Image (cartoon, rainbow, N blue to C red):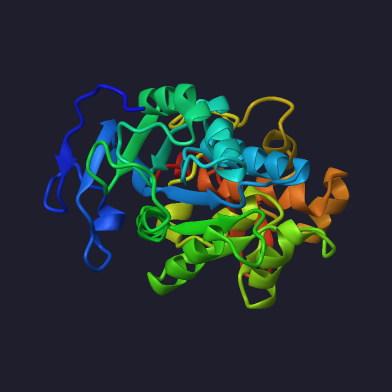
Amino acid sequence: MCVAMHAPRLDPRDPRYPALLAAVPSPPDLWLRGTLALDDALAIAIVGTRRATTYGLAVAERLAFELAARGVTIVSGLARGIDTAAHRGALAAGGRTLAVLGAGIDVPYPPENLALMHEIEGHGALLSQFPPGTPPMPGHFPARNRTLAGLALGVVVVEAPERSGALITASLAGELGREVFAVPGQITSEACRGSNGLIQDGATLIRDWYDIVQELPERWRRAVRSASEPSGADDGPMADSDEAHILALLTPEMPQHIEALIARGNASPARVAAALVTLELQGWARQLDGQRWVRVPARRRGR
């Protein structure tokens, strides 16, 4: 089944062509449905098995939601399982998501994701390097996976068995110089043998969105916004948020070690660390040597 539509074809010289993908060797022409934005350069791919566990689906959706809520575009492949969960998480957060197809831009695959395709088109873009009308073929997906990896600063593998297209995507991301992340899974689960193997081979272990953001170059870390306030807001973090609670413990004059903030904040180390990086990205706090933190006076923010 094909969907009637008009889709522009972009070559790498087109000003609308994604800058990250244009930087890889031999970037493909792309057919496009939806819109591409300059902010889509702050993108993370989330991929994994089609036969995901309940745990894997929940983690993929949560990671996508938390990243998209902070202005990160989520890239995935529209496949069943982890890919679908990642797209849905981004959309639930009101964020942007890009779906890279292994078929023509007008071919719904899998067919049950037709409604999801339309939703993604309205909040991001559908992309394909294959001409309209091209059916999904096994040989298309490795090429699709390279394009998917090229669109993102890093690839997160949530769940993947030992033979998985997600592992191909991770390998291609490494070859392109992009970050490779993996979510740890049960050691007895076949669905996690490949993703756990990535960690064993040196991929960054992921526990939450902060573990991803902290590995990005500073330029991109600073582009990530707080989930608790609109970009550009100047009134401070939302009341009762972790960020507001930790900010209240900081002063401009007396640097405090993160361990002291964890003890005083009565919160887990992960929550305190996540709050601190959000405050730093928004200009409310600054990290000094030795994991010591200070509050940034209002008159200095924005410099």
What is the number of callouts on the image?
A: 0
Q: Quadrant of residue 203?
A: bottom right
Judge by depth and name the residue closer to the eye, 51 or 291.
Answer: 51
Expressed as whole percent of the image width and height from the top left, the position of residue 57 reads: 69, 41
Judge by depth and name the residue closer to the eye, 70 or 127.
Answer: 127
Tell me if I can see residue 234 in this picture. no
Expressed as whole percent of the image width and height from the top left, the position of residue 10 reads: 16, 44
Q: Is residue 166 left or right of residue 274?
A: left
Q: Is residue 64 left or right of residue 28?
A: right
Judge by depth and name the residue closer to the eye, 241 or 71.
Answer: 71
In the image, is residue 35 above or below residue 11?
above
Q: Is residue 20 left or right of residue 98?
A: left
Expressed as whole percent of the image width and height from the top left, the position of residue 29 reads: 19, 51
Tell me if I can see residue 253 in this picture. yes
Expressed as whole percent of the image width and height from the top left, the position of residue 241 reads: 71, 31
**Quadrant of the image for the N terminus?**
top left
Judge by depth and name the residue closer to the eye, 302 or 194.
Answer: 194
What's the residue at 41%, 40% (across, down)? 99
In the image, is residue 85 above or below residue 196?
above
What's the residue at 26%, 53% (across, down)? 19
What's the residue at 41%, 55% (across, down)? 141
What's the residue at 30%, 36% (across, down)? 105
Q: Quadrant of residue 100?
A: top left
Q: Is residue 123 left or right of residue 51?
A: left
* Farthest-out residue, bottom: 201
